[in-house]
Image (tube, rainbow, N blue to C red):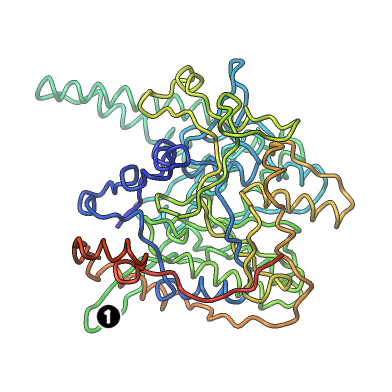
Amino acid sequence: MGSLPHSRASQVDAYNEGKYDKWLIAKKPGNKNYAHMPLTLGHYVREDLPFNYALVDAFTICDQNFCSGMTSTTPNRSFFWTGKITHEENVILKANIRNDDFAYRKHVWKTFPELLEENKIAWKFYQNETSGGGGFKGEERAWLANFGCNLLEFFKAYNVKFKDKYIENLQKLVDTLPAEINKLQEESPSSDAAAKKIQSDLKNKMKALDDATADLQKWNEKNFAKLTDEQKSLFYRAFVVNKNDPNYRSISSIKYDDNGKEREVTVPKGDVLHQFRADVNSGKLPTVSWLAGPQNFSDHPSAPWYGAWLVSEVMDILTKNPEVWKKTIFIVTYDENDGYYDHVVPFSIPDNNKPETGKVSKGIDTEVEHVRLANELKQGVPEKGAREAPIGLGFRVPMLIASPWSRGGKVNSQVFDHTSTLQFLEEFVNRKYNKKIRIENISEWRRTIFGNLTSAFIPFDSASEKLPFLQRDAFVETIFNAKFKEEPKISKALTDGDLKNVESNTNFANIMSQQEKGIRKAYA
């Protein structure tokens, strides 16, 4: 049924300075078929996502884990890998709070993997294939690329344009565009409109050829060889792909019978976890690993629910090797909430310009956590989309922690955000290797307010996992079948009597879905 609005503007508007009363207005579905439905109140229950529930039943969920920014995807990923989204531009603070503030090789501030590299701590970022490089057609990108989840592609230090597929595609453009340009130049237009189109196409292709030629002179094997060993290491570790699987850039299909109806669904031909699986099986998993799945395994509303299979497969890979699992912590989280309502109002930093918003402890800079309208307008943000508000927090997202130190189906309610994972890695690396790693990008307000995840762990529990590991093809068939089910409808309007009954006894059971009842053990 598609995604819901989750731009910076729609997020801030729904929040409405903490009044939290504009969700239905700000989050109207873009799909006209559902514009009348309060989809923002939609949610999953156990029967929808049984594996996710089973994972939480076995391990730990953090139920006060918030997005770092009240905005969309990429800025929240920036907090997750770098601890911030701001930098100074033309002597004023620039908050890179929208997806289009990020582009390949654009940013230069320090990322956490660079700190690991400088301190000789082994790390890798696994994906089936990067987004930078391209060359995918049709459905291939959604099944095989990393959905832009590898933020390191947007940072200059990682030199993503040296990627083999990027260079191959540049060469292809240089080889094929001259013939296409010649063909256009020889065409005889049948009308003024046709002539204008030819001129426009010609201009675009000539620019594309010039750009590809210039890029090829810079991004080639000869220039890659000139990089330092440290630069090459950042490149190799950041862009670990499944090139050792001959089918890693190919798709296939599953044909199956659905009660007499033949169905066919696309799937990857190769193993999207090939290199990760190989490193675990051979005992070569580094100290710190990040994994990003393709779009269709992302749990994003534009994709089916195949993400549960990806998480299940990672857990299966890790737990099959006891020597790896006994020293592993697996953290599963999400960058942002799409446009789905959550009843827990996120915390936000006081604004020095508005005394009624409160104060912070001495020494905490509040300005670095605010977006100013005047700055946005100066930096070219259209007036309709510009917003003055704190950067965050954004709305809650799940965080599941699976390890031999987080067993037991517990709930951790300490306040976390995306920087909490970086703070955990600091603590872990510093204790294990006697280092003094600290990423300076994380603001003092965030360090003061948010925990470093260490409260989510208990002494080692020797119990074994009892998870219903998912078989990919059978699982894909089940989920794909949902596409052919009847779409939900609002069954009836509430009567005055219904409303009075709710007001008098605050019992919503007859008019809306209820949260699953039960008690969980809480961490202190």
Please say if 458 is above or below 335: below
Question: What is the three-letter code of the residue carrying label 1?
Answer: Asp
Q: Check disc 1 and report its element: helix, strand or loop.
A: strand
Farthest right residue in view: 434
Where is residue 524? Give x, y as percent. 72, 65
Q: Dividing the image into 4 quarters, which one contains the N terminus? A: bottom left
Residue situated in front as seen by the camera: 60 or 491: 491
Farthest front residue in view: 504
Left or right relative to 316: residue 387:
left
Left or right relative to 494: residue 145:
right
Please say if 100 is above or below 22: above
Farthest left residue in view: 191
Name which quarter of the figure residue 217 lies in: top right
Please say if 194 is above or below 98: above
Where is residue 481? Give x, y as percent. 30, 73
Q: Residues within 10 Å of mark 1 (few under 14, many from 20)?
A: few
Residue occupying image coordinates x 60% and y 33%: 369
Residue situated in front as seen by the camera: 333 or 114: 333
Name which quarter of the figure residue 155 lies in: top right
Residue occupying image coordinates x 46% and y 55%: 343
Where is residue 208? Give x, y as percent. 40, 28
Q: Which residue is mark 1?
A: 258
Left or right relative to 202: residue 321:
right
Residue occupying image coordinates x 59% and y 39%: 162
Residue situated in front as seen by the camera: 259 or 408: 408
Residue situated in front as seen by the camera: 30 or 450: 450
